[in-house]
Image: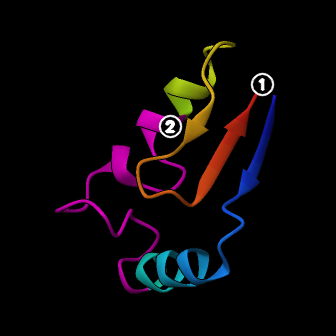
Amino acid sequence: MKITLNPDKEIVNTIREGLKAKGGYCPCRVGKKEEYKCMCKEFREQIEDDNFEGYCHCRLFYKSK
């Protein structure tokens, strides 16, 4: 399993600014729930699946097989 940042630096910078503004919570989601804390629960669960390959919800991280 390999997790990398999105190669698009503009997306990475935008998401990082949003994370900073929301105190580490996903800027793409409404509200501040513990499961939205970056790296979000949804993505942590997805990366447990050996067959999953793709981006997290906000497209900051990418998991390759």
> How many circles with numbers are drawn on the protein?
2
Q: Is residue 41 left or right of residue 5?
A: left
Nearer to us in this view, 12 or 44: 12
Q: Which of the colour schemes (rainbow, by chain, secondary structure, one colour) is used?
A: rainbow
Say if 51 sits above or below 36 in the image. above
Type of the residue with mark 2 = Phe
Indicate left or right for 44 with 64 as reference. Answer: left
Q: Quadrant of the C terminus?
A: top right
Judging from the image, what secondary structure is the residue with disc 2 in? helix
Asked if the magenta segment contains residue 60, the reply would be no
Displayed quadrant of residue 41 = top left
Q: 19 or 11: nearer the eye?
A: 11
Circle 1 is placed at which residue position? 65
Q: Main secondary structure of the magenta part?
A: loop
- Ranked by sequence position, the earlier of labels 1 and 2 is 2
Comparing 48 with 23, the one in front is 48
Q: Dot 2, crowdedness within 10 Å: few (<14), some or many (≥20)?
A: many
Tag 1 secondary structure: loop
- Name the residue beneath numbered marker 2: 43
Kind of residue at badge 1:
Lys
